[in-house]
Amino acid sequence: MKGYNLLSLFILLLLLPLSSAQYWFQSGVRAGTGSYFNHGAKISIQTVSNQNVNHGSMAFWTGETLADDSFLQVGYLIPNESGYYPTNCTVNGCASRTYLSKGAPEWFYEYFSGTGTHTFTGNIGPNDSAGPNGSIHTYGFFSSGDKWSFFMDGKILGAVFLGTNNSGSNSAVGFAEVANTSSTTPIMLPVMFSNLSIYNGSRFMKATHGYSYIGYGVGSASGIPNPYGVKEVDSRINYFKVGSGLPTLNEIQLWQLGYYLTITSQYGNLSGTYGFVAYRNVPLPELGNRLQESESYPELSTVMLPHSRAGNGTRAVFLSWQGSGPGSYSGSSDDANVTMFQNITEHADWGIQYLLNVSSGIGSTSGSGWYNANSTATYSINESDIYAGNMSRWNFSGWSSGATGMSNNVLMTMPYSVSALWNKQYLVNGHTAHGEIKGLGWYTQDSAANVSIIGRYVNETSRRRRAFFSWSNGNMNDNITLNVNSPISINATFRNQSLETLESTDAYGQRISGVSLYSGVDLINSHSFLFDNYRYNISSAYYKGVAMPLSKTVNVSSPGIVQVVLPVYNIEIYTTDVFGSPVNATVDVQFMNGSSESLYSGTSGHIEIPDVPYGKSTVTALLSGQVVHSLSYGDAVIKITFISNSDLAALAMMVIIGMIAYALAGRRLSRHGDPRATHARTA
């Protein structure tokens, strides 16, 4: 700051004698380095006109040196003598003169080009143009390109073109000046300055720092200490007084201008009020990181929420900033800044997200991740079958949630975990030369596979064919059940069959109809296709309701007739009287199968029942109230004898006759003597 002074102008104009030593005392505030490279400055200055200006003159202004070494200033001055003063001065001279009264405050501006010429150029306002005593007015200057304009209370006072549009590495100042004095006897009543501001090309911003300056103007003697000091007003930022009796400490920081950034946030522990130097650009994400050193916040994007009823799969996701105040930011940018022109409030809006965890011990899944609350998430399994070879695989069976589709949706109202469920499956495979095997395919481990042959035979002639014989596991049933706990290969085998006629006969070769023959539990029809060279054992016959065990082995190699002799017999029943004469009786026969037959023996007294299955038969005969019971076994002939009343009469007569004959014989013996007795006696 060169500190050029106006008093030289007044001396020149009024031809006042100069003392041997001249002082240009300057006191006030210079802005910090934050004001470098500005495009102007302004300050509010109190008008104090009742100053003691008998010795020297006083001026109060803001100004600075520019990047090309030019200098400019604007403010108000108080003349020390009444008279005519030049106005509208340029490097070519002054265009007019104006009368100023001693002690009357007038606005002024002046500038010096960077060429080194210090000729006064500028302008002075009329008497009392700086306003009444105690009033406050704002003075300043700003550039528009190389044009610099001077103003007071927003009214342009004049303009000049200089060689630059910025201040370079120079600070703006707010000074009080006592010029052209040889002593410190002039008393300066304190004058209040406020709101020293810097123009950044688009707006004026208050100086962030203010430092005291107690010094001398350019060309001033410095043998006498500067008695005019500066002091901050009531600890108010950017308010200070300059005058006599105030501290004269140089380069003391009077203030640091700052504003508060207040952040409100439901999550992230970001809420709080934080102070920053004025006009600083504050990156909001960086602030979030700095305030949360204990956790990771990539671009202030997510905050894991504490455990809740939903577990730890819940987080808050940063959505946007809602700012208020000049320089604030509203939006969702990840690299948002705020500029601290004034106090700012920023509110962080968050959205809740829930974690969807999709897992599977086999294969791969899709859908795991974070989803906005109340949104719909889709999860899926990428493959339904995972093969562990040609005949083993894992088959997707559904989800732990109960859903069965490969792809499903879920409304994310809380953290959600779902697992894919799998079944181990084995292939039941088979082959057949004829027909078709039904039931082949994939089966879940430990399940049952029902396998059957469709098309059990293929005719070659009317009496020869190829027929299903057995499965490769030895089972001869055409429909089998397999327990699947490993891969299974099962083949159907076919053999030749011949048509055989099975004739049931009795022991005499007489054919018997209505007979069912069995090999084990299998029924063999009377006309059956039997496997060639296969040993059949006819183990039983079912005839007339009786199962009769047999042991007949059949081994065929060509179509033919096979005789099967059944263990049957004929029942013969004879009914006679005691004299052997036939009688007609009623005969009931109870067979082993529970059936019965009632017959009459007729006049011949004879009944014959053919082909009765071997076993016990109960025979009951009835004649004239007489009941005779008998049992029949095998081919035995049953003879039943009845005794009638006439038989009894005849028998009685025979007994009587016998008795009479016996009596007559006794008498003959008694008359002639017993020969035996005679012989005895003789002996």
Image (cartoon, grey):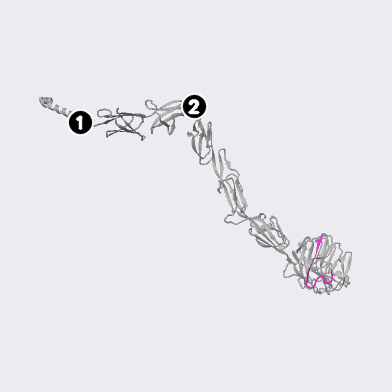
Above or below, 180 relative to 590: below
- Snapshot quadrant of residue 580: top left
Residue at mark 1: 652
- Snapshot quadrant of residue 632: top left
Is residue 644 in view? yes
| Mark positioned earlier in the residue sequence (2 or 1) | 2
Measuring from the top left, give residue 225's x and y in whole percent.
80, 71
At label 1, counting other C-alpha atoms closer than 10 Å, the crowd grade (few under 14, some 14-19, many 20 or more) is few
The label number, if any, that marks residue 683 in the structure image: none
Instruction: Please tell me which residue lies in front, 558 or 28.
Output: 558
Instruction: Please tell me which residue lies in front, 602 or 313.
Output: 602
Q: Horizontal placement of 272 versus 668: left or right?
A: right
Residue at 37%, 25% in the rendered image: 508
Measuring from the top left, give residue 462's x and y in whole percent.
49, 26
Identify residue type, mark 1.
Ala
In which quadrant is the C terminus drawn? top left
Asked whether the beta carbons under mark 2 and mark 1 sit within 8 Å of each other, the answer is no
For label 2, the SS is strand
Instruction: Please tell me which residue lies in front, 645 or 477.
Output: 645
Can residue 468 be found in the magenta stretch?
no
Q: CA distance from mark 2 to mark 1?
A: 77 Å
Instruction: Please tell me which residue lies in front, 193 or 330.
Output: 330
In which quadrant is the N terminus drawn? bottom right
- Bounds of the magenta span? 125-144
Is residue 185 in view? no
Identify residue type, mark 2.
Arg
Above or below, 352 relative to 673: below
For label 1, the SS is helix
- Number of residue marks: 2
Can residue 138 be found in the magenta stretch?
yes
